[in-house]
Amino acid sequence: MKVKIEHLHIENFGKYSALLGSGDLEFDLGRKTIISGRNKSGKTTIRRAVRYIFGCKDENGKEITGIRPHDENGIDIDGLTTIAEMTVSVDGAENTLKKTCFQKKNRQGEYTGEDNTQYFIDGVRKNTRKSYGEFVQTILPDPVCMSAQEFFKQDAAGRRKLLESTFFSHTIDEIIDQNPEFEELRGKLRANSVSDLKSACNEKINGKGRGANHVDGLNDKLTKLIHQIEFELSKKVDIDVAELEAQKKALNKKIADNKARQEDVSKEFEEQQKASDGVIELKFELNDLQRKANEDLEKKRREIRAEINSVDWQLKEIRHQIRLNKQDIEAAQKSIDTNTVLINATRESWKMANERVFDENSLICSYCGQEYPEERKDKIKADFGKNREEELIFLTKRGNELKAAIDKDKAEIEQLKAALKEKQDEEINLAESIKGLEKCLEEVPQSVDISDRPEVQEIQKKIAEKEAAMNKGNSAEEIREQLKDELDDLQLQIYEVQKQLDKAEENNLIDKVVEELNTKQRNASQEIADVERELDLLKQFDRKKAELLESDVNSNFEYIKVKMTEPQVNGDLKDVCQIMVDGESYDRNLNHGARILAEIDICRAFQKAKGVCLPIIVDDCESLDDWRVPNIENQLIIIKRSDDKELKIEMEG
């Protein structure tokens, strides 16, 4: 569809009523229309009138205002109706678009200051602004097609989104079909964006939230598993199970031999029992007293050993905490060292920026060697001062942030050192406690001397009386007693061995727990590897999509190049939207003439994508040589400042 502005009529439109009254402009005499004149001659008013009729917004993205007729001092002129009417040719057929705006009166006949806008198409009034806008949109599908300022008034994200939605021609499935390595991402990318999937992967690995609201990620889970394994292993006791089993086997054999020998002397013992009636029972009673007394000692030894084990466990735990505390101190110190280097570099940068002086040579055009106009000089100087001030503010803020980080780390080190001192003191106290308990254990006798007890002495007296009456039976009795004592001692020894074997069984239980934790650790590590692999694949896909996007976008432009991404240190891509001409950025170093050519290129590209050929309006063209204006099929409306007192309209082509 080819659209051309043929005629423009404006009446009582802003300052136009004061400057020129009503006016009619013909555009059908040539392909290129040049509107020139000095400041306040009405050039901008014509451009605003065209945008107003088409329903475009102003350079700041707001509705066009200030159309009410007013004089040179900005005072409204009451009672006048603003008229903006434009005839356009759409593929050879004419349509007339018209807007009128008049001030409302109250019941007293006074002007209220409110406006009433009416809309017309080919002389037919439209009831609503929406119905008018729907028709205009068939002619002008996107304001960017007519004026590139509609593109540049958006931020980088808005520009990028507009370019992608207009020019990107690849679907997710097409990219994956051409790059089979991304096949496993197909389902996820159909339902989610790459950035959302990468955020989800990072949350899985590192968790989300801070402080009390933090939700653990896989790295947190893995760290906790490692600490659990270290803690469980610290509870193990060093025991030689094979040696203990050998001791138990040897003791069981001695017990069996002892019992066999006791059976051999049983008959002799029975024969002597009558003669020593009651002696055996008395000795049993005496042995039972001794055994009970020894049980108290053994109970005391068990209690002391249990307390030693408890304190020893506390000692291992506090030593583990000391190791972690020292690691935290080292990490904080490394952070201080790193930030110290950064803050010194920042201070040096601040000093260099503060000492930077304005280069007077920048006021001279590098192409023609002539000085810029005073207005341009003032702007260049102001930009220099503003940029230097912004850089100093940024560096100052950066330095303050680094200093705050260093102070925070130093304060944290002091707290960690204080905590470390408390733990080290506790470590010393626990070690001393273990030494004291071990000394108490050594002081516990192996057997209790009960000979001074009255009941023992009484039993021994009775035994002596009966043994005096015994002759030959004494030998069998002595053997029997010796064998029993030996059996008691063997049973006591095997009891001690069994206690050690029980501890070994506890080691086995710990080993099972550790094995389960190791399995969980391996699973967590594998899960992290899987998520990191998916994250890396997403980054590769992002890079591939970015390459295709930048290629698709730039294939539609002839004069400019668009940079859509910047690589980051972590392998990610940062979304940007930088318009470049011969390596120079539109937003920074590009001269005004080149900017105008870039704007024309942008309008033509969007028109091509929308399937239309529309007029292109370019303002501030006084710095663009006529020979540089491209010869394009579109109707080109060029607005530039000149020394002409009156507004001047010229047609070319």
Image (cartoon, grey):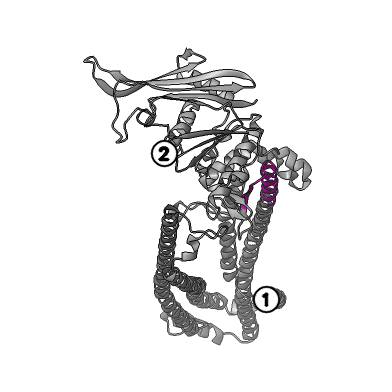
The residue labelled by disc 2 is: 645
The residue sitting at 64% across, 86% down in the picture is 475
Residue extending furthest toward the left = 108
- From the viewer's side, name the closer residue of 90 and 267: 90
Whichever of callouts 2 and 1 sits on the residue coming sooner in the sequence is 1
Q: What is the magenta range?
A: 540-565
Q: Give the alpha-carbon distance from disc 2 to disc 1, as whole Å.
A: 110 Å
Instruction: Quadrant for the C terminus, please.
Output: top right
Circles 2 and 1: CB distance less than 8 Å?
no
In this view, 549 is above or below 267: above
In this view, 175 is above or below 476: above
- From the viewer's side, name the closer residue of 179 and 321: 179
Q: In screen coordinates, is 328 left or right of 536?
A: left
Rate crowding at label 2 as few (under 14), some (14 to 19) or many (20 or more) other CA atoms within 10 Å.
few
Residue 481 position, x and y percent, is 61, 81
* Mark 1, secondary structure of its residue: loop
Q: Amino acid at mark 1?
A: Asp
Query: Is residue 559 one of those drawn in magenta?
Result: yes
The residue labelled by disc 1 is: 240
Asked whether residue 231 is in view, the answer is: yes
Residue 314 position, x and y percent, is 48, 71
